[in-house]
Image (cartoon, rainbow, N blue to C red):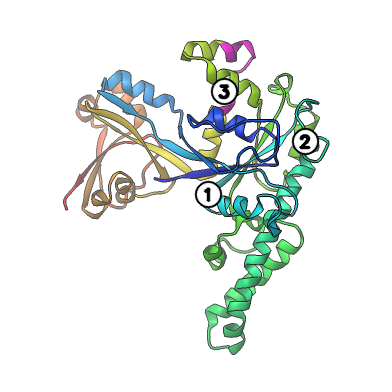
Amino acid sequence: MALKCGIVGLPNVGKSTLFNCLSNAKAQAANFPFCTIEPNVGVITVPDERLNILEKLVKPQKVMPTTIEIVDIAGLVKGASRGEGLGNQFLSNIRECDAIIHVVRCFEDPNVVHVDGSVNPVRDKETIDTELQLKDLESVEKKISRVEKMAKAGTDKEAKKALEVLLVFKSHLEQGKSARSTPVNSEDFRFVEDIFLLTAKPVLYVCNVDEGSVTKGNKYVEMLKESVKDEKAEVLVIAAAIEAEIAQLESYEDRIAFLSDLGLSESGVSQLIKAAYRLLNLQTYFTAGEKEVRAWTITKGMLAPQAAGVIHTDFEKGFIKAEVIRYDDFVKFGSESACRDAGKLSIEGKEYTVSDGDIMHFRFNV
């Protein structure tokens, strides 16, 4: 299941440093604006402790975690919606992403130049919001001009409804608010699906702080949290510089010891990836056999045939049944055969809704 998150933010907020920690791909991280000219794309392994447990129980030839694509997008400045700086490129790249990871600078460092001369996370967030909203407003106005004539003719009821909804989006954006919070019914978002509004995408805010603020935050973090409290958006606190040090450590044990010394139980990168999963309403199911234990990403609420289609389209087309074992049952009884003997393996049909952690085997015929 292809999934792409775009890391955005003003120049010099720590986007590329964070990207380097997230991915094996290496973006240039330098103390000057626009050091990331082309969007760097990396593939992130999604951390899931359940895979380690399944590996011990099944002893497969290989283990395959699920992944997310991450894109480090060029820094944005005021006027981007009019093409200033690398604006057109930025907006084009972000349009292709499923979610936005918005990195905000929440640390002071005289050696790292701020593009606006001072640290103010609320101002920085609003700068990017404004540019995205202006571009969205342009897109909405263009669609309004297309449907207005049909709506006024009175012969197309769908066009009339579309115009009503588009005018609500237009008014909302003109007030400096993002499309995701437009006061319309969820089904009415279908009228803007074809114009791919930038501010309709789900967003996760990442406060990049200094080492001393990683466990308790600071005044800048509190400023940002207060600013976004009505957005229903998650806010993470991460020290990109610390994450860079963790990324250099070779062994898992060394990373755990390093985190423990800092009073942390989990790396910021791991927290971020899991938060991105939640942001996109995703969950994981597993396939487990001697050759391979593998994690698969699906959307919450997905039915068994659709989940099978994530492996291969033929699995969905020819779906017959799914053999399902709950993860907790698999761990308790230790193997597929033991679960079968204990009556913990169920045979499910096309209407089965897959649960997070299900261990599945599909029967299909094409």
Taking depth in this image into account, of 340 and 249 the one nearest to the observer is: 249
On the question of residue 299 being in view, the answer is yes
First reached walking from the N terminus: tag 2 or tag 1: 1
Query: Secondary structure beneath disc 3?
Result: loop
Q: Is 261 covered by the magenta stretch? A: yes
Task: Give the residue at x 70% y 54%.
Answer: 80
In this figure, which residue is indicated by the disc labeled 2? 114
Amino acid found under the numbered disc labelled 2: His
Where is residue 53? Give x, y as percent: 36, 21
Where is residue 18? Give x, y as percent: 60, 31
Q: Nearer the viewer, mark 1 or mark 3?
A: 1
In the rendered structure, find residue 97 and report the number of the disc placed on it. Answer: 1
Amino acid found under the numbered disc labelled 1: Cys
Task: Give the residue at x 73% y 19%.
Answer: 212
Instruction: Give the alpha-carbon distance from disc 1 to disc 3, as whole Å.
Output: 24 Å
Taking depth in this image into account, of 78 and 349 the one nearest to the observer is: 78
Mark 2 and 1 residues: CB-CB less than 8 Å, in contact?
A: no
Compared with 254, 338 (above or below) is below
On the question of residue 334 being in view, the answer is no
Residue 56 lies in what quarter of the image? top left
First reached walking from the N terminus: tag 2 or tag 3: 2
Instruction: Give the alpha-carbon distance from disc 2 to disc 1, as whole Å.
Output: 26 Å
| Left-right relation of 118 to 103 | right
In this figure, which residue is indicated by the disc labeled 3? 267
Amino acid found under the numbered disc labelled 3: Ser
Q: Which residues are magenta?
A: 258-269
